[in-house]
Amino acid sequence: MVEQSRDLCDCRLIHRRTVEKAMASALAPNETESLAQIFKALADETRLKILWALEQREMCVCDLAAMLGLTESAVSHQLRLLRNLQLVSNRRDGVVLYYRLSDNHVSQLIKITLEHLRD
């Protein structure tokens, strides 16, 4: 006898109203794509380390590279991707470019995920 998967119903029954309500509240395709891109960015350990460091304090590329043991070019590449996703922003002070989280939502997203992981 083949064991049924615990993730499947024992019978096939579509609850049309439930499906209709789910479809009515579904995310727009552009929102789904944007969310997926952000979660892909957060799925990379290097980018996550960068975001966590920037959650603590504003830092320049040189400092981030030294902290991570990476080249400045590699860190700059990751920061460009994070900036394009509006997760980080920067400011120039003379010849130094400092990076920070774009807003508190990025920090909240990381902290909520950590809280979920630690529970």
Image (cartoon, rainbow, N blue to C red):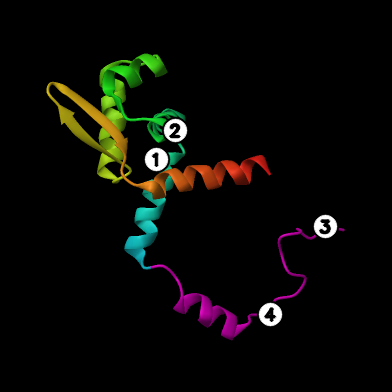
* SS state under label 4: loop
Label 3 to label 2: alpha-carbon separation: 44 Å
What's drawn in magenta, residue-wise? 1-27
Question: Which kind of residue does numbered mark 2 sit on?
Answer: Trp
Q: Nearer the viewer, mark 4 or mark 3?
A: 4
In this view, the residue farthest toward the bottom is 17
Question: Which kind of residue does numbered mark 3 sit on?
Answer: Glu
* SS state under label 3: loop
Does the magenta-highlighted stretch encompass residue 8?
A: yes
Q: Which residue is nearer to you in this view: 26 or 94?
A: 94
- Per the image, the residue denoted by label 1 is 41
Residue 89 quadrant: top left
Question: Which kind of residue does numbered mark 1 sit on?
Answer: Ala
- Per the image, the residue denoted by label 4 is 13
Q: Nearer the viewer, mark 4 or mark 2?
A: 2
Whichever of callouts 1 and 3 sits on the residue coming sooner in the sequence is 3
Q: Main secondary structure of the magenta part?
A: loop
- Per the image, the residue denoted by label 2 is 52
In the picture, the disc for residue 108 is: none
- Residue 103 x %, y %: 34, 47
| Depicted 79 relative to depicted 3: above or below | above
In the displayed structure image, the side of residue 21 where residue 85 appears, left or right: left
Residue located 28% across and 32% down the image: 99
Q: Nearer the viewer, mark 1 or mark 3?
A: 1
| Depicted 107 relative to depicted 67: above or below | below
Circle 4 packing at 10 Å, graded few (<14), some (14-19), many (20+), is few
In this view, the residue farthest toward the right is 1
Label 1 to label 3: alpha-carbon separation: 38 Å
Residue located 25% across and 43% down the image: 84
Q: Quadrant of the N terminus?
A: bottom right
